[in-house]
Amino acid sequence: MVFETIKLEIDAVDTVIKVIGRGPAVLALHGAATIEGQEWARGLADRFRVYLPFHPGFGESGPAPHICGMQDLIVHNLRLIAALGLDRPHLMGHSMGGWMAAEMAVVAGERFARLVLNAPAGLNHPDHRGANPTKIAPQDLPGYLAHRTEVAARYFPGGSLGPPPEQFIAAREKEGQALSNIQKAHGMGHPNLGRWLSRIPNETLIVWGDKDRVALASQAELWAGAIPKARTHIVPGVGHFAMQEDPACVAAIGDFLAGRK
């Protein structure tokens, strides 16, 4: 299967969505950077049609300097779903995309089927603080993103799936600015997010690599305890890039979305 490309204008933002597969729709939201790409979605494409939008200011999407907090992304994505004509798609998000997906389910959970939160950001509980990627030296970052450093290293310059250095640096500068706009309101999260999670009506799977150094897996029970219909899936021996380190993780997500778990 090959990835299709859809281009839409959402609130005057040029928005690019990669799409792959056939079956029930899944909207998958990436994290605070697009380093790891989208190849993982092939693991769902035999059962689902996976929509992978680039957030405004990230990847192939155009800039959106008006954004000043996560609420802007919530509205953007709800309008994107309407523009795509998706009827109760499954919703999943990784890291910052998990925080994004959670807030979307808080305010509009009835518009989605099942929910997957993969190492979600956003709670910032003082007893479960992981590493801050912005404080990590670039050469050390692969070791924080994956337990097996070589898995993450392949997405960096010099790796088998990595772009040239100048392209990598330009992408990080562009996405860094977009991320700083999202963080203007409350940083990487919201102080009341934990109070809101009980509004999520969806069957929810919390996925976490037990070796995650960016977002600690000890948070999983906090999320599962706050979301009424949540369960956890802890993946042994992998880090923040759980789906890239262990393809069986993607298969487990697919089983959950298909109602087999």
Image (tube, rainbow, N blue to C red):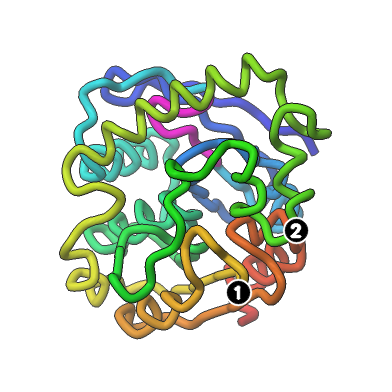
Q: Residue at x 77, y 39 (%)?
A: 154
Judge left or right: residue 218 versus residue 196: right
Can residue 89 be spotted in the picture? no
Q: Residues within 10 Å of mark 2 (few under 14, many from 20)?
A: some
Give the quadrant of the N terminus: top right
Image: magenta residue range? 52-59
Q: Is 60 placed above or below 203 here?
A: above
Where is mark 1, residue-wise?
210
Q: Is 129 placed above or below 1 here?
A: below
Where is mark 2, residue-wise?
148
Q: Residues within 10 Å of mark 1 (few under 14, many from 20)?
A: many
Q: Residue at x 53, y 17 (%)?
A: 170
Residue 41's disc is none
Residue 27 image offset from top left, x and y in percent: 50, 49
Q: Nearer the viewer, residue 9 or 166?
A: 166
Tag 2, which secondary structure? loop
Residue 242 image offset from top left, x and y in percent: 65, 61
Quadrant hosting residue 252 = bottom right
Q: Is residue 55 magenta?
A: yes
Residue 60 image offset from top left, x and y in percent: 52, 22
Quadrant hosting residue 158 = top right
Q: Nearer the viewer, residue 40 or 86?
A: 40
Judge left or right: residue 258 versus residue 105: right
